[in-house]
Image: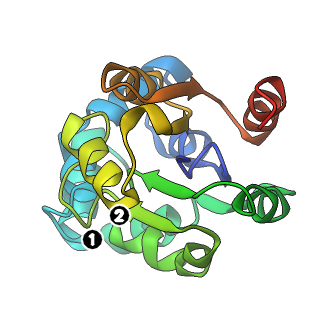
Amino acid sequence: MFDLGGVLIENDTFSRLQTLLPQAMAMPLLKDKWLQSPTVRDFESGKIGSQEFASSFIQEWSLPVDEQGFIAEFVTWPRAYYAGVKDLLATLRQHYKLACLSNCNVLHWEKFAGIRPDFDVAMSSHLPGVTKPDTLIFEKALALCDMRPDEVWFFDDAMANVQAAIKLGIKGFHCDGFNAVRNCLDEYDL
């Protein structure tokens, strides 16, 4: 089970967001603020739509952009699969059930609709209405995959998500970028 942004998909969220901020912020603080943002969590859990997200996010983060400009920018933040991802997924899929579990939103999920066939199960947080690291999203993913926690290997770039998975009995691995995923898979002969 793979996270998408920052694991399988190149993600410019934090570098692009940094350019919009009125004042630069240290990257670890920026990532923490993003993960704890009520506006981000509401959007990624499907509780608010795109326009409300843009309006609330601009206000919460004091961004000097309008809603339309922000949405146009926001849609570009996740870019594409890292080079080699499709080949690796095809190889893995010959031996394993593959799933993606992503904190995502309607805009990015639509942008990447074409990747869903690469997985046996593809789940975005905005659909069940709950985000990682909430235990409920992992339980829902396990049910969709028809797997027990001890049968699942989970790769994510957010340590809080990995820790939540591990608490449920899932084998969790912190992988920041696709090279880290490949190294982890090689280390465990997967």
Circle 1/circle 2 CB separation < 8 Å: yes
The residue under label 2 is: 105
In the rendered image, the quadrant that contains the C terminus is top right
28 relative to 54 in the view: left or right: right
Mark 1–mark 2 distance (CA, rounded to whole Å) = 9 Å
27 relative to 180 in the view: left or right: left
Regarding residue 59, the answer to whether it shows in the image is no
Q: Quadrant of residue 19?
A: top right
The residue under label 1 is: 50
Identify the element where label 2 is drawn. Answer: loop
Identify the element where label 1 is drawn. Answer: helix
Question: Hey, what amino acid is under mark 1?
Answer: Ser
**Mark 2 closeness class: few <14, some 14–19, many ≥20 residues within 10 Å:** many
Q: How is the image coloured?
A: rainbow
Residue 86 in the image: above or below residue 39: below
Mark 1 or 2 closer to N-term? 1
